[in-house]
Amino acid sequence: MIEFLKESTFTVNEVIGKAWTLTKRNYFSIATLCFLMFLTSNASGLMAFFLKDVSKGLSIFMAALFVMLYFTINLSLLKYIFHLLDDEEHDVSIVSTLPTRQQIIRFLIAMCYFMFCILGVYTVVALVGFPFIYTGIRMEVITNIAISVGTVAIFITWIRISFFPFFIIDKNQPPFGSIKFSLAITKGNFTKILLLLLVLGGFYILYLFCASYLHWPVVSFMINILSSFIVVPLSNVALTIAYRKMMSEYKGDEHPDIIHNIV
């Protein structure tokens, strides 16, 4: 029986420290994959812009093609980081880290589940807020409260189930199983994951502050460059290490259900 089911806690400092060491040692290979993702994302936007007046069908096809390419590189990056964590002594080519067709299909199906979960949370919040229309409270107030609560609920849901790609690549889990396991291992770890995301996203927050509030274009540009070439590779490694750390201490059921892992 695969032994990867344990309840988890992890230290943010430990995760960041290990991620920094691994990223520094293998920076160019990790950064290359991140850069390919960046190029693919931007190329998709450019192609959609140039083809929008030529053919709508061709524009949609190219957009779908670039999305598939972006996801494939993203999964390759995860697979490569797992290789570094498991066997860093032996080199591996980027080509050998390409995900299998089954993994890509499972990822795409899991992405649909992911979006359904987000939509489901929004629907539940809307249904809960609907009776307040008849309380006499102004509609504007109800709308603002519903949007605020809905945003928080969606954010929490996003964090709880966003680890599903790791299970598909690392454990070859089926789509819905990967969603359930993500929900299971993040139970009790939400605060630590949030803190990790705040640390990793600190440069982006600083970038927004300098660009939007202080209006320092040169400083914000330098921060953006630093974030793109340092923080993005580090973030991918850190989240993978956090996943492995949580899994190494998980003591839950081999077939986790959703109900018992929501809270």
Image (cartoon, grey):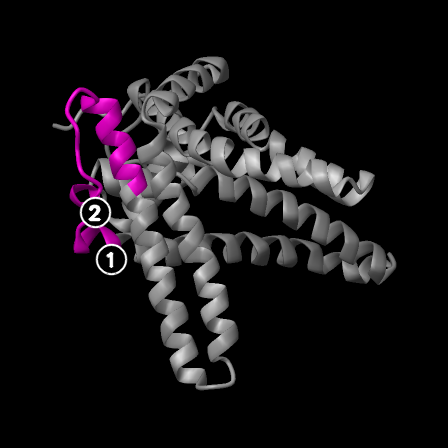
Q: Residue furthest bottom?
A: 54
Q: Mark 2 highlights which residue?
A: 98
Q: How busy is the neighbourhood of tag 2: few (under 14 within 10 Å), some, or many (20 plus)?
A: some
Identify which amino acid the numbered label 1 is placed on: Ile
Q: Was residue 92 drawn as part of the magenta stretch in this picture? A: yes
Residue plotted at (65% across, 41% down): 221
- Is residue 25 visible in the rendered structure shown here? yes
Question: Residue 257 appears at what percent x and percent y?
Answer: 34, 39
Residue plotted at (59% across, 29% down): 198
Q: Quadrant of the N terminus?
A: top left
Q: Nearer the viewer, residue 239 or 40?
A: 40
Element under disc 1: helix
Segment colored magenta: 77-104
Above or below, comparing residue 192 to residue 166 in the picture: above
Residue plotted at (20% across, 42% down): 97
Nearer to us of marks 1 and 2 is 2
Residue plotted at (64% across, 50% down): 150
Q: Is residue 137 left or right of residue 257?
A: right
Element under disc 2: loop
Identify which amino acid the numbered label 2 is placed on: Leu
Q: Nearer the viewer, residue 234 or 110?
A: 234
Q: Nearer the viewer, residue 232 or 169?
A: 232
Q: Mark 1 highlights which residue?
A: 105
Q: Is residue 235 left or right of residue 65?
A: right
Q: Is residue 193 left or right of residue 94?
A: right
Q: Was residue 194 drawn as part of the magenta stretch in this picture? A: no
Q: What secondary structure is the magenta-colored segment mainly?
A: helix
Q: In the rendered structure, which disc, 1 or 2, sits on the residue that comes first in sequence? A: 2
Q: Residue furthest left?
A: 1
